[in-house]
Amino acid sequence: MEAEDEGGTQPGAVTHEEPPNEIALYPNIQDIEDRNADNQLKVDNSDENSVRRGSSPAPPVTGFNFWDVNSYKRTVKRIDDGAKLCDDLLKLLAERAEIEGLYAAKLQGWSKKWNDLINKGSEYGSVKNAWLNITTEADQLAEIHSELQNKVVNQVHGNVQKWKSANYHKSLLSWKETKTAEEGFSKAQKPWAKKQDEVSKCKRAYYQACKVRDQTEKLYKESCVKGSTVNEEQVKKLKDKSDKAANDVQITRDKYQESLRDIGTYNPKYMEDMRYMFNKCQQSEEMRKNFFKETFLNYCQQMALSPHFNRISSIYSDLNKAFEGADVPADISWWSVNFGSEMPTRWPEFEEYTGQDVQTVTLQQQQTAVTQANTSQGAPDSPNAKKSSVCTTL
């Protein structure tokens, strides 16, 4: 009977030692069986299948064969693994979206905190404006990362969730797709397994008959040796047993060969039915892998910063202009005009008593003088108009 492994490769005994720092793209069969604690596979797991990056899957070592009874269970289990891989991918995407959202929220919180502190602080003028542009940059960058979060959630995570719901349907104890595959393989293999049991039964009977024949022939030959103490009647009985044993060997041999012919006749039907079910599982797995590939490409497209390059460039271009626009001499001049040596002088002069409180009158005079000074500085022809222009912008 022709033997094929699950991946369609011919059986062989080639193994590859895994080089250091190489990623194994294809797992060992032991890894496949041990991937989940609820694994119920009972087939031989002695084969290895380590594959280096860029190479083809290595042929399995002898010990496992898809055509053996119940060896299809690895393929059925792969359906459950596919559903779990969807869950893993959903979790990965959700965590990345959360990271983007947290980063955006942190930037916004940081921006608000420092925006308030700067506005309440002692910095003034154009340098204060430069400080505030740092918080503006954070708000703009937070907006981009918030958009990335929404794209991952809606365009990638949502698509995976919908695809899983459409392709994996939960039944009472397992996925319906798993149950359907298990029933299909079992139905295809049951008649052949029954014939294989008959072959095994006939083989055991034949081997047992050969064993009895050899024993009886040995006893008969020993009884015929000269000087044997076995009487003629016992020799005759041993001869009859030997003949009967030889006859039983022939009968069991014929049955054994007949059972092999029977199963050999059924082998093509068995292989056709098993291939049909296996190809259905292969198509399902190919569809899942293609969807995952499309999801990865979609993720790359949604998370790529290249569409935001113009925005990011503009953010930092504006930020640089704000920093370059910090006019330190103008700020220093503004302070001098409003709080320093360029303020108008108010020397004390003789003031006639008017009957009012001296301090009240003096305060009113000071307020009037400041108002007049600011008015004169704001006039177009004022020599201080250029120096105090920063004040009007604050």
Image (cartoon, helix red, strand yellow):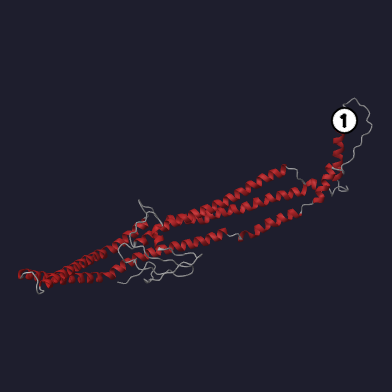
From this viewpoint, which residue is outermost toward the bottom? Answer: 226
Would you say 90 lies left or right of 331 here?
left
The one nearer the camera, 22 or 150, is: 22
Q: Which quadrant would the C terminus be assigned to in this image?
A: top right
Residue 319 position by quadrant: bottom right
- Vertical comparison of 49 with 153: above or below: below
Q: Does residue 364 appear left or right of residue 299 in this picture?
A: right
Residue 251 in the image: state x and y as whole percent.
15, 70
Q: Can you identify the residue that label 1 sits on? A: 361
Direction top: furthest residue:
355
Whether residue 388 is visible to the viewer of this picture, yes or no, is no
Badge 1 density bin: few <14, some 14–19, many ≥20, Cα 10 Å: few
Q: Position of residue 353 (x, y in %)?
A: 92, 27
User: What residue is at 72 percent from the left and 49 percent from the top?
Assistant: 131
Q: In this rendering, does residue 345 appear at all?
A: yes
| Residue in view at x 27 percent, y 70 percent | 267
Please tell me in which quadrant of the rendered image residue 37 appears: bottom left
Picture coordinates of residue 300, whole percent (x, y): 55, 61
Q: Most extreme residue toward the front, as rendered?
A: 227
What secondary structure is marked by label 1? helix
Image quarter (top left, top right, bottom left or bottom right) of the N terminus: bottom left
As shown in the figure, which amino acid type bears the numbered disc 1? Val
Q: Is 376 on the left or on the right of 164, as rendered?
A: right
